[in-house]
Amino acid sequence: QIGSNSSNSSGSGGLNGYPNQNVNVVVQYSAGGGTDLSVRGVLDGVPDFPVNFSVANVTGNGGLIGLTQVANSAADGYTLGVMNTDFIINIILGNTDLTVDDFSPLACALMDPFVLIIGNNENYSTLEEFVAYAKEHPGELKASTNGAQASNHIGAQLFAKTAEFEYSAIPYGGTADQLLALRQGEVDFSVAKVADFASFKSEKRSEEHTSELQSLRHL
């Protein structure tokens, strides 16, 4: 969901004369990840907007640094942000004093399901084989996540709990780094959004010791 600071979302002059300067869009995750690509795609689809959108990737603390910057910005329509699942998780966990009421929603940008993703591996190539291997080797498999207690981490936790196996979660700085770690063989699997997976599948591999990623199932 894309929105802005709610304290005075109409600005001092309402729509009269707006916009007369570039609009800053804060994305709280690293460039190339699912949230970043989704936001840029939405912005590219805005027709005939008279000024430019300037995307700033402000990462850290599970997305809270970027969202705090949006909440503290002037409520003049020139700073937009992104609210996603991670923000709700942070509220539930008590990691922030921010609430949804600190922002004014402008649009629901997209809905994106999660997928279970693996690299090339001789021990499993189907969901059934993966779960069987994980159960036979408790705690051996490692999963990259987009941050501790972030959405992809929660997805991996729910999947492992449902399938009844143990694993080790390795947090990275964002989804792009998370999937790069999987591609380079640093971990065994990941749970991420379809947009993230599609983005990595479409990239031409240029590095040695990388593997093709495979989606096993929508979650």
Image (tube, rainbow, N blue to C red):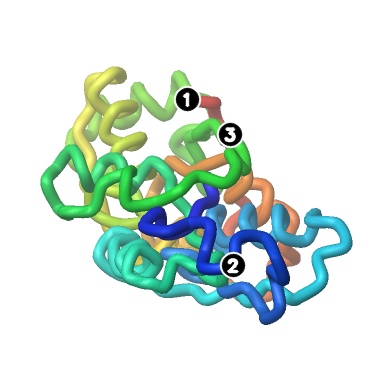
Of the two numbered discs 3 and 1 on the same chain, state the one appearing first in sequence: 3
Report crowding for label 3: few under 14, some 14 to 19, many 20 or more residues within 10 A (C-alpha): few
Task: Please name the amino acid that badge 1 sits on.
Answer: Leu
- Residue 72 placed where, x, y %? 32, 70
Q: CA distance from mark 2 to mark 3?
A: 33 Å
Q: Which residue is mark 1?
A: 219
- The quarter of the picture where residue 108 lies is top right
Q: CA distance from mark 1 to mark 2?
A: 45 Å
Report crowding for label 2: few under 14, some 14 to 19, many 20 or more residues within 10 A (C-alpha): few
At 86% across and 57% down in the image, what residue appears? Answer: 47
Position of residue 153 relative to residue 64, above or below, is: above
Position of residue 6 relative to residue 13, above or below, is: above
- The quarter of the picture where residue 93 lies is top left
- Is label 3 in contact with label 1 (beta carbons under 8 Å)? no
Task: Please name the amino acid that badge 3 sits on.
Answer: Met
Report crowding for label 1: few under 14, some 14 to 19, many 20 or more residues within 10 A (C-alpha): some
Q: Which residue is mark 3?
A: 111
At 34% across and 61% down in the image, what residue appears? Answer: 63
Q: Toward the viewer: 151 or 124? A: 151
Of the two numbered discs 1 and 2 on the same chain, state the one appearing first in sequence: 2
> Which mark, by number, is residue 31?
none
Task: Please name the amino acid that badge 2 sits on.
Answer: Gly
Q: Element type at marker 1?
A: loop
Q: Element type at marker 2?
A: loop
Q: Toward the viewer: 152 or 56? A: 56
Q: Toward the viewer: 173 or 206? A: 173
| Residue mark closest to the camera, 2 vs 3 | 2
Q: Which residue is mark 2?
A: 13
- Residue 218 placed where, x, y %? 54, 26
Q: Furthest-left residue in view?
A: 94
Give the side of residue 109 with respect to residue 63, left or right. right
Q: Is residue 63 visible?
A: yes
